[in-house]
Image (spheres, helix red, strand yellow):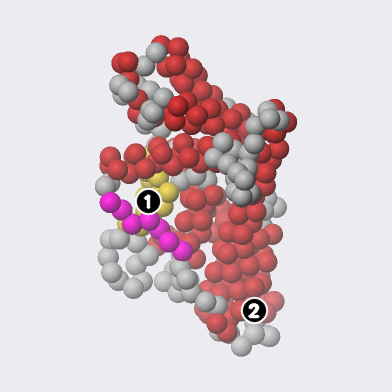
Amino acid sequence: MEKTSLPESLMGKLSKLLALRDGTDNPAEAANAAARISELLTKYNLELSDIKNPNDEPKVEMEEIDLNQFQSKTDGDYARDLFIILTNAYYCKPILMMRSRHKYDQNGLAIIGRPSNVKTVIFTGTQLINRLDIMESDAWRTDKDYTELKRNPYKRAYLRGAVQGIKEFLRQQRKAEIEKAEEEQRKNAPERKTHTSNGDTNPSNPVMALVKVTNREIEDFIQERMGKTQSGKLGQRELRGEAEAGNKGYRDGYRMGIHGGLNGGSHKGIIGN
């Protein structure tokens, strides 16, 4: 359906919902607006581009970070893995930017998403890396007389474990967001089911609808600007004999506490004490 043929009332409704989704600081309002947008787009077989003014500023942006500034050549890939985890947690997409094949060049990572989410990923990642550096140094001072590991292997194991702990914390946080949204949805519309017959989460869930709409925006941006790309993937290294340091890092990473709203939210108060 062409934009010019859209009923004015439908255009007005979608425009208001988009403004609410992008302008509210309330995660529940943003999720519910996204759910309604997704329903209307599906019902009328529309794309977001059909209802956006071409003169509007883009809703999606890309920012590239140089991973070399966040870790040394002996630190492994923990910073890359951390930023990939955060991009997924804050509704963005990571794209690896290969500049060289040198084994010590960490290359770049492009973060694509809504401007507020991209900024949140970079801010949160930078703060976490600073915190992790301090926590690892404290752990090493405690363990150096009791571990068989030398300094660099201990550091790599601890940091990889900490990143996995952060990943699990964020996974649990996303699960809680979905469950909370489902509970609010049941209260507001008791007759509307939020699970399928096999127990899977229904796409009508507001959080999942927000993910769907955001992913659609990002994929449109990538296709238009970049074409075929290689998504960032986590390293698959095992801890081997470094399990003790890795497990300590995992526990510390999980306990750090990271807070973020559905739209990224304010850059203040994202990382807990």
Left or right: residue 9 compared with residue 105: right
User: What residue is rendered at 59% in x and 30% in y?
Assistant: 32
The answer to whether residue 2 is visible is yes
As drawn, 69 above or below 141: above
Q: Which residues are magenta?
A: 228-234
Question: What amino acid does circle 2 point to?
Answer: Glu
Q: Residue furthest bottom?
A: 148
As drawn, 68 above or below 142: above
- Percent x, y of residue 256: 66, 57
Residue at the spot of label 1: 110
SS for callout 2: helix
- Percent x, y of residue 12: 45, 15
Mark 1: give few (<14), some (14-19) or many (20+) Cα within 10 Å. many
The answer to whether residue 57 is visible is no
SS for callout 1: strand
Residue 270 in the magenta stretch? The answer is no
What secondary structure prevails in the magenta region?
loop
Left or right: residue 54 compared with residue 146: left
Question: What amino acid does circle 1 point to?
Answer: Ala
- Percent x, y of residue 198: 61, 50
Residue at the spot of label 2: 244
As drawn, 230 above or below 72: above
